[in-house]
Image: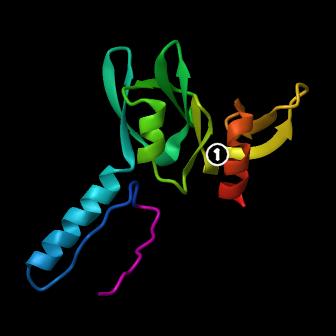
Amino acid sequence: MKVKFNIAKQFIEPFIQINAQQKNDDLIQLSDSIEKLTQSWLINGYQDHQQFVLSLPHVVRFYTENNYVICETDDQQKYRVKERIYFLNNQLPTKMFIQVSSSEIINTNKIDHFSLSQAGRYQINLTNGELAYASRRFVKTIKEELS
């Protein structure tokens, strides 16, 4: 099977197209697998009694606030999600997200740089200007995952 990219500015959103002489069981299974994979990169978020479908690459971080798990996106929007931090940590793509404390998971693609705070804690500066702090318990894991 060949994989071919068609890159053009006219495409607003990426899509996958399967070209074949006829539909068969293998192609149906391939289609189902692709659909499951792309659906796993979405999460439901809630804001003002409305439900939104959020794309994981646009998520900056998940954190707890007032007994809720909050999802923060690139555009500084905040959504409440129903999943708990420990559940998200097991379900999110491991190459894209990393847990930095017991109450926060960040998107590794949204890390701008690391620094030390005045209190001696590891400070994670995110691309949207927000700050996250790594707890000592997770520092070793963060170093291993990002190196």
Magenta stretch containing residue 62, yes or no? Answer: no
Residue 23 in view, yes or no? no
What secondary structure do most residues of the magenta stretch adopt?
Answer: loop
Q: Which residue is mark 1?
A: 110
Q: Is residue 60 left or right of residue 25?
A: right
Q: Is residue 18 left or right of residue 65?
A: left
Q: Is residue 109 left or right of residue 13?
A: right
Q: Residue at x 17, y 83 (%)?
A: 20
Choose top left, top right, bottom left or bottom right for residue 112.
Answer: top right
Residue 54 in view, yes or no? yes
- Residue type, label 1: Lys
Structural crowding at the residue carrying mark 1, measured as other residues with C-alpha within 10 Å and reported as few (<14), some (14–19) or many (≥20):
many
Magenta stretch containing residue 5, yes or no? Answer: yes
* Residue 123 horizontal/vertical position (percent): 78, 35
Q: Residue at x 80, y 37 (%)?
A: 122
* Residue 116 horizontal/vertical position (percent): 87, 36
Q: Quadrant of the N terminus?
A: bottom left
Most distant residue in the front direction: 137
Whether residue 115 is situated above or below residue 47 in the rendered picture: below
Instruction: State the extent of the magenta-drawn residues as a range.
Output: 1-10
Whether residue 80 is situated above or below residue 14 in the rendered picture: above
- Viewer-proximal residue among 64 and 44: 64
Helix, strand or loop status at disc 1: helix
